[in-house]
Image (tube, rainbow, N blue to C red):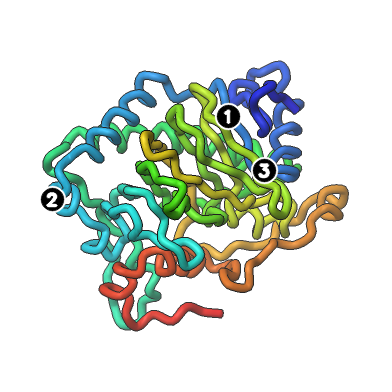
Amino acid sequence: MSHTASLTLPIIDFSQLSGQAPQRQQAISQLGQTAHDVGFFYLVNHSVGQPLLDEVQRVARAFFALPQQEKLKVAMANSPHFRGYNLAGVEITRSQPDFREQFDAGAEREALPDTPDAPAWQRMQGPNQWPEALPELQQVITRWQQEMTQVALELLRALAESLQLPRHAFDNLYGAYPNEHIKLIRYPGRSEAESRQGVGAHKDSGFLTLLLQDDQPGLEVELSPDNWVAASPLPGSFVVNIGELLELATNGYLRATVHRVVSPRPDRQRLSAAFFLGAQLDAVVPVYQLPETLARQAQGPASDPLNPLLREVGWNYLKGRLRSHPEVAQRFYPEQRLPQ
């Protein structure tokens, strides 16, 4: 696999995955092996231009620099769809507060009718909250979401090919109304005497996560129990990781890897923007039939007893949101009991 002297994760060249690339089959094979062995990699030579990436960073910084009262006008606590702004320390991972200020958005859709017999996860679909004080945030982030969707879908289809499945094997799960998600995140500096949990150890729940980092370190990946390595910033790249949907769909052959973020030191802050490619909420994840050589290496999905994996996509997403956002859970889902 490709590495540089200072990087601990593999590098995948997105341009080699295209239909005209002379080394395409080799690149697809490398992608599949990396997704199986590590579950994390850098994606370089992707099709999202640097000017747009710079704009995403700029508007994210501008949003977090707004007066607190402006940010609180779009507080997530006002949204049953888990969209909007959270103060540092509001989101919870493994029962501990995450010290990150953040803004969440998703695909812009109308809310579904909330009828008595509708499953609770239907309430997750709905409109975003956008700050009136920064109208360009919606414009830039919507354009970024559209371009990131195309990159992530190409990766998803290349992964299907690496598994010797039809190229569009996962498209039915992605569906016409996928649960795509964007999170803009600012990690404030913290002293050694304070909790350094920028975000606690966790797996992501979708197909794929593509993360745009600034120049500050902090993201760490658990390659084996208690063996954490730094996903150091690599200019122009995305850090990509496999989510639980692909771990479930491949019976554990593809690896959803645990990761965390350690807070920067007191005189620094860290900014990142995450794009999550998800599936349609009403989908149920099957186990795809892999070739025998790959199926023998599939050890089953690694389900945490405290956070069990569910094949019903809507419930799997919702249980994570309820656990992470108790304010929204108490206000909009007071009756909810998660399935076991």
Name the residue nearer the viewer: 89 or 55: 89
Quadrant in which the C terminus is drawn: bottom right
Name the residue nearer the viewer: 126 or 199: 199
Q: Distance between the residues labelled 1 and 3?
A: 17 Å
Q: Does any portion of residue 178 appear in the rendered image?
A: no
Q: How far apart are marks 2 and 3 (CA)?
A: 46 Å
As displayed, is residue 215 above or below residue 197? above
Residue identified by numbered label 1 = 43
**The disc label shown at residue 69, or none:** 2
- Which of label 1 and label 3 is nearer to you? 1
- Amino acid, disc 2: Gln
Residue 29, image x and y in percent? Answer: 75, 33
Residue identified by numbered label 3 = 160
How packed mark 3 is, by other alpha carbons closer than 10 Å (few <14, some 14-19, many 20 or more), is many
- Amino acid, disc 3: Ala
Q: How far apart are marks 1 and 2 (CA)?
A: 37 Å
Say what secondary structure mark 1 lies in.
Answer: strand
| Sequence-first tag of 1 and 3 | 1
37 vs 90, left or right, is right
Residue 80, image x and y in percent? Answer: 28, 65
Say what secondary structure mark 3 lies in.
Answer: helix
